[in-house]
Amino acid sequence: MGFFGGLQKMKILAYEVGKFKTPVAEFSVYINPEKYSHSFEICYNDVQAQGAPGGSPNFNKVLSETVKFEIVFDGTGVVSSAIPGVIPFMADGITKQIAAFKSVVYNYDGEIHSPKYLELVWGTLEFTCRLSALSITYTLFKPDGTPLRARADATFISYKDETELALSSDARSPDLTKVLTVRAGDTLPLMCYGVYGSSNYYTQVAEVNGITDFRNLVVGSMITFPPLGDAAA
């Protein structure tokens, strides 16, 4: 049984806002990874009485997912360049290839005061994330020491904005306190709906936070949403 269609390259899209609406940069990997790992982890508090034969782990939190893979960069000319206008075998070897990759996933962006938000897209993988770790190993060189081949081990940690996290979690749990950052367009009733599933608690939340004008929230300010029982009291 054959596969139809052309070869799809893994793409890494970069964004300046964690809403992942309009990418500001893109990188298509030079050679598709042979494999990638997608890890999930749950954190528990280990509760065990002295002398007990076993523990009773209590749920603490779900840790961020991670995706790891290896990217191969080649400047020998064996594989055509993935970067428009870059000749595979050049005097600078793979320098431009790696610089283009780092400019998307690693470099500090002065507009947002951090590296960019990222989205990995390949086949069924659609992973919104940020780069967590990058290690580049150079494996082949020209006689003058210019690198011609390298392997980059990259680790990406999942990212969801605060509103999405509130909506995807059990936001109405009575024993959880949440702190959210006000973004453009946010209103206190709307934020209460995202946290509690109802906008009816906005007056209580305003009182808890000392907000006197809930209609004009300050973008960038932090608002505490107490446990539902406390907010409804």
Image (cartoon, helix red, strand yellow):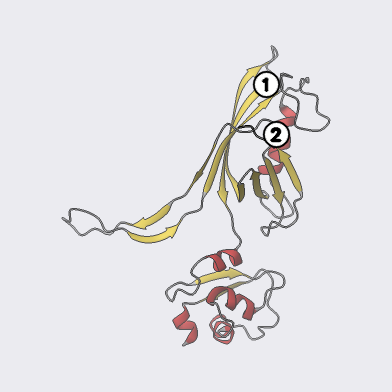
Looking at the rendered image, the disc whose residue lies closer to the viewer, 2 or 1, is 2
Name above or below for residue 199 compared with residue 119: below
Residue 120 drawn at (x, y percent): 64, 45
Residue lying furthest front in this view? 1
Task: Report which quarter residue 105 is drawn in.
Answer: top right
Write the residue at 67% across / 16% down. 145
Q: In this view of the protein, which residue sits in the foreground, 2 or 184? A: 2
- Disc 1 marks a residue whose amino acid type is Pro
What residue sits right under mark 2 in the picture?
A: 7
Label 2 or label 1, whichever comes before in sequence order: 2
Question: In the image as oriented, which residue stretches furthest toward the right?
Answer: 85
In what element is the residue under mark 2?
A: loop
Per the image, label 1 sits on a secondary structure element best described as: strand
Residue type at mark 2? Leu
- Front-lying residue, 127 or 231: 127
Residue assigned mark 1: 147
Residue in view at x 56 percent, y 37 percent: 69
